[in-house]
Amino acid sequence: MATTTAPGPVRPAGRPAEDGPPSRRRRRGVRRSYLPYLLLVPAALLELGIHVVPMLVGVWMSLLELTQFHIRDWSTAPFAGLDNYRVTFDLDSATGRDLLHSFWVTTAYTTLSVGLSWMLGLAAAVFLQRPFKGRALLRTLFLTPYALPVYTAVITWTFMFQRDTGLVNHALDQLGLVDGANPPFWLIGENSFVALLVVSVWRSWPFAFLCLMAGLQNVPAELYEASAIDGANFWRRLRDVTLPMLRPVNQVLLLVLFLWTFNDFNTPYVLFGGSAPRQADLISIHIYQSSFVTWNFGLGSAMSVALLLFLLVVTAGYLLVTNRRREHA
Amino acid sequence: MRESTGERWARRVVLGLLTLFVLAPLYVMVSSGLKPLRDVQGAFTWLPSRVTFEPFVEMWQTVPLGRYLVNSLLVASSAALVSVAIAIFAAFAISRYRFRGRQLFSVTVLSTQMFPGILFLLPLFLIYVNLGNATGIELYASRLGLTITYLTFSLPFSIWMLVGYFDSIPRGLDEAAQVDGAGPLRTLFQVILPTAVPGIVAVTVYAFMTAWGEVLFASVMTDEHSRTLAVGLQGYATQYNVYWNQAMAASVVVSVPVVVGFLALQRYFVAGLTAGAVK
């Protein structure tokens, strides 16, 4: 049945709403004017109720002094104006400094994770282009981490990163890379950032692979043949044919990976069991901790709003730059 | 086009390393689920000292895994079914009609995907608690609340993918049905849906996976009775004892259905992504 779905890249640009036979046109015209809206009502209501309204409430909460004393009846919470934001961005206070630290950790984590996931995904997609024995099997295997529920994957990694009972130290010891008598900790201290990064890449590179593989299917074989006749080697083909053809996929893929990774909560939450070590204190976990452990929801909301604004600015800038480059290309 | 020797070796090395990277946790999960407790309390061993299915039996007692499983099944399947039903109507409207606000709706719905979960977790938590106090409808710490929350998570991407599928169904079919006197809804149910079955199945699996795997809201919005696997599975690691073999056995049981479902339908995901991403 792939025939009905595969040739989907071109979407008809526009079509007049009136295409019935003339005799029915008037009756349809009335019905058609409200029917599409009616069809959208359930989706719109849910998106409004679960996303848009809570977001607006969140903005309002960030202006309140919403601490544990006012959770029961939050209409009693005093208006705080921009106080929560002042605390959030006050680099002289511990709160502000910790948030900034968490922001840098998240930025480094996101950059490395997205970059590595993209490179692994590209390598796998390119090397699986050519038919060979076992290709379908490898393709299926590579998609498995994406299909696994995040918590089972991360719990398994938690087990693997255990200092005394895990696979990682055992394998490194067998390879002679660590001192078996005194193996390193992975889930606390300096190494926790590396552990988090490894798990994150393991989880997200298959998605990059899936998208890039889909994108490569649209590259006409003649392009490769032409560049091979020109004597282009592997790298030249990659640079001159593959990457330019993947540009539209990359534009969406990198943005989606960035947003997912920057907002990532699941991986650190399951890997470290609730509270992340300072070296791996991602922003979502940090805000969660600041809100639910101290029950200061006003402050937590202010941090969340700041995070959303940051993501909005980055996304808008990214789309602006990449769209302009696309037009010039 | 011939593959040079260098390329062939690069391909083997890269794909070999990636295979090892992907396989390691899968191997640990399956092999540790077959180990006696003693094996996972000492230094790691590549093979079980003896193969046993005890972890698969004992895991139901160590934590109330059965209850978590039922909760997850109920929440994920109702979220998936409702979400797909709603997405079908929305996608039909977007694919087959030009109307004012069409673009706005699509952009708004997709952009909710970028909201940090943590931003609307806090307000939603308070809204559910307060709504419950005011009306008596239990949304906080209930499967109903969790279901409603989760179905909105998969909705945007489901709509997006289904619009792609519906767009690829020729309008000639609609028009033929209309000439026969079918109204829009009959056209949807008798012409479009039967043609789009693979897409709808793929989207349903996606929605199920989204709800099945969610951790953040599950950790805040559930109590002991409504707890789902996402939170419940962490119960194997207690302060006193860590039953890694049972945790791994439970992970296998919980993963197999979604992994099999996804892998069986992978080509439809690729097709859906192609339709969406290339636009």
Image (cartoon, grey):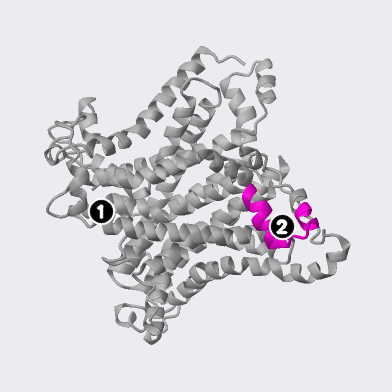
- Three-letter residue code for mark 1: Gln
**Could you tell me which residue is drawn at 37 percent across and 59 percent down?**
B216
Residue B191 is one of the magenta-drawn residues: yes
- Three-letter residue code for mark 2: Arg
Q: Nearer the viewer, residue B172 or A120?
A: B172
Alpha carbons under labels 2 and 1: distance apart: 46 Å
Q: Secondary structure at mark 1?
A: helix
Q: Which of disc 1 and disc 2 is earlier in sequence?
A: 2
State the residue position of label 2.
B96
Magenta region, mostly helix, strand or loop?
helix
Q: On what subunit does the disc labeled 2 rest?
A: B
Residue B135 pos. (x, y %): 41, 83
* Residues packed near mark 2 inside 10 Å, few (<14), some (14 to 19) or many (20 plus): many
Would you say residue B279 is visible in this rendering?
yes
Q: How many marks?
A: 2
State the residue position of label 1.
B234
